[in-house]
Image (cartoon, helix red, strand yellow):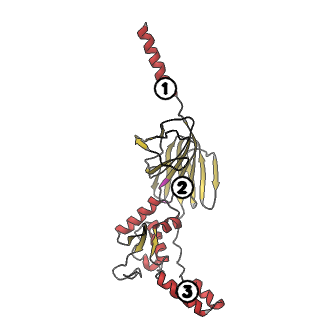
Amino acid sequence: MLRETFQILTLLVVLVGNTVQPAYTVENVVVTVYRDGVAVVEINLYIEEDRASINLPLIGEPENLIVMDGSGNLLNFSLKNGDLKVYVLGSHQVKISYETQDLTYKSGKFWTVKFENPWKTKILLPQDVYVVGMNVTPEGFTASQQMLEVDMPPGPVEITYILEPSAPAAPTPFYTQYLVWFGVGSLTATIILLITRWRRKPTPIKPEKMLKGLEYLRPEDQELLVFLGESGGQAFEAEVRSHFKLPKTTVWRMIKRLEREGLVEVVKIGGQNLVKLKPLAEGETGVSEGS
């Protein structure tokens, strides 16, 4: 009789343990999808009681995972089978951020965001998309000049869309702004400005000259080459991220692809990465060896 009672108690403990609610509340989840298919996942949690650690599932395989408390201090964590264990050590606010390439795939001209969603999630798509299909009705749908915002309920998520092609903008020669000043300012001052600018940065490079024979490159890599050309053949990595509004790892992959093609080189200056166009065999980039 005593043995049977013990077995029943053990079974009840197991059942209760399996139904215990997590000791945290998911305040919001934002998945930002970029043009190249990389997604940035941001999860904000509120820990309801003092805990040494918490466990939660993640959406996709994480890269560049960062976990912080509410004050911005880094927290230790471990990963196992897609689950994240965070050692919160009494913190009540936890912010999780990472990149993943597992949420999107491309078939022809169609892109699809697809994943199993444990929580209500705000999905931000690039501005220039045409949504052609969804597996469920979203809870909210907002378009702005920056992003397309889709609020999805928990459960399977599948959104199919088409990206509008983005043509590289034609470069504006740096001296154009100074030509206006010739009519309204001092000729001497303008010449000084021109000389100063000329010494500081090489002449912009025409996109059609720079991209000749490079049509096989990805569109985003071509756009990066054009941006470097418009910047006089070089720009800091931080400037590239700011211009394209892409995460650090996405920009770095673009740079490394061009570096493997022998089109750019990366130089360390004061702890920052300076990305420079490399001269081609016959100077086709218009960048001299000394630039």
Residue 36 belongs to magenta span: yes
Most extreme residue toward the right, as rendered? 184
**Which residue occupies the foreground of this view, 232 or 120?**
232
Mark sitting on residue 17 = 1
Res. 161 mark: 2
Where is mark 3, residue-wise? 193
- Name which of mark 2 and mark 1 comes first in the sequence: 1
Horizontal side of residue 29 vs 286, given as left or right: right
How many numbered marks, from 0 up?
Answer: 3
Which mark is first along the chain, 3 or 1?
1
Q: Name the residue: 62% across, 62% down.
A: 145
- Amino acid type at circle 1 is Gly
The quadrant of the image that shows the C terminus is bottom left
Quadrant including the N terminus: top left
Q: Relative to 156, say whether 193 is above or below.
A: below
* Boundaries of the magenta span: 35-39
Q: Amino acid at mark 3?
A: Leu
